[in-house]
Amino acid sequence: MNQRTLLRRGFADLDDPGDTVLDHSKHVKDPIHGYIPLSEDMLQIIDTPQFQRLRSLKQMGTSYFVFPGGSHNRFEHCIGTAFLAGEVVQGLAKRQPELDISARDIRCVTLAGLCHDLGHGPFSHVFDNEFIPRAQPGAQWSHEMGSEMMLDHLIDDNAIDFLDSADIAFIKQLIRGTTTPMRDEKMFLFDIVANKRNGVDVDRFDYVQRDCYNVGEPSSYDFSRLILNSRVIDDEICYNQKEAFNLTEMFHTRYSMHKRVYSHRAAKAIEFMIVDAMLIADPLLHISQAVTDPRRYQTLTDNLLYDIERSTEPELQAARDLIARIHVRDTYKFVDEYILPPDLVSAVDSSVTPAAIVGFRSDNDDFVEHDVLVDICRIHFGKGSENPIDHVSFFSKYNTTEKYHIGRELISICVPEKYEERILRIYTRSPAKRGQIQRAARRFIDKLNRSVPSSPGSSPPASSITPNRALTIPATPADTKRRRLQL
């Protein structure tokens, strides 16, 4: 029996055991979860322009330009997350009736899973992590805030009347996540959709499995076992101790996907181009101002690039040129990367800039600051530099009322000792100048290494940034596209 059939189907009202899913739901076929039942409440949300907008937002952003299978959208991810949210809360209610989980709890948790990504902008995290900080420096905005705004708009615009103000506030807080005790609400419910304790939540269950499936990367963890082997102890969702390695694999899979897929060099280069195009278009199209206007935000999707392409305004010509370059794969180019020692991250953060690299040009170099792009990529297991398993509580089958933590040495001697890395990457807007920029960057890095003070009693310095010889660009690099055509 596979994981699609392991989980109980349906969203039955616990207050009326006579109700069945067939009375009130439709079903959709999903490649990850099989047949997903959609309750009448869910359908009222799904069949709205605000939710249907998610069909036009790629789940994986610019990674789709590199991984053709990653064509899935936020739409199906939100439905999958809602399904898993319902499975978790109903499973807990069935196994632990003493929790007094109500029909309202089930409804609100399920709808929080359904609506948690309503606020994503074009190309998902590119919009809130890269574009908005540059278009509106200092602005405190996130896609979770956008989700709350769009939820209000959805409810008002479609006359949704089965939720009262307390329900709406509860759903918003479930989307936002919290570890602060909430009056009149069960705290373990906040572990389900957006778990701020440890990151073990149904949002991650769905997107990791769905992304792996669509890009063809194997996933070695089983979220259905986690759901079936969970219970609430002291108002916290805990897991059977036998699932410790399964959870470790989940966090490792997340790290692996970031390392190999989400932070792919070519995807990042295209991300830079899309952000540049949006910044050029922003003064005319007022893209960044839509984050405070739900009616305008409702029309803001990945189709923005097509809107720019169809435009005829002279002010958008530079943006149209960038999009045209993406179509013919004349993209910005990766130049070099360095894995940063943890004790040098702050020094690199403050000193490695395009201007600093320009300062190390040789006499014959002609690149300028605009040609250089610097990115510090942060990849981790889900809790920064900490082991996320340290934040998960477990129980034993011999005592299901006491929770405890499990040290990594009790899980495997092969688990990592470090859980976060920072990678300095350099790109260029001018591919012909890659070699110049790399040589200047390496001269700068060499100077930075020599300026690092030695630890007491150590020589050479305790840490240094090491260039990767395999990435060294020859002095006269061949045109790779021409060489490919010749072959």
Image: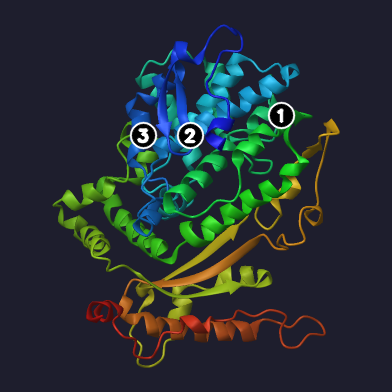
Q: Amino acid at mark 1?
A: Pro
User: Which residue is rendered at x = 52% and y = 17% of the image?
Assistant: 165
Name the secondary structure under disc 2. helix
Q: Which amino acid type corresponds to the residue marked 2 in the rendered image? A: Gly
Rendered image quadrant of residue 423: bottom right
- Neighbor class of circle 3 (other Cα within 10 Å; few <14, some 14-19, many 20+) is some
Q: Earlier in the sequence, mark 3 or mark 1?
A: 1
Residue sitting at the far front: 1
- The label shown at residue 127 is none
Disc number placed over residue 293 in the picture, else none: 3
Instruction: Work out whether residue 135 can be spotted.
Output: no
Distance (Cα) linking label 3 and label 1: 31 Å
User: Residue drawn 30% across and 37% down?
Assistant: 299
Q: Nearer the viewer, residue 203 or 35?
A: 35
Q: Write down the residue under mark 1.
A: 181
> What residue is drawn where x is 47% and y is 41%?
143
Looking at the rendered image, the disc whose residue lies closer to the viewer, 3 or 1, is 1
Q: Nearer the viewer, residue 473 or 459?
A: 473
Image x and y of residue 469, in percent: 51, 84
**In this view of the protein, can residue 248 be seen by the observer?**
yes
Q: Quadrant of the N terminus?
A: top right
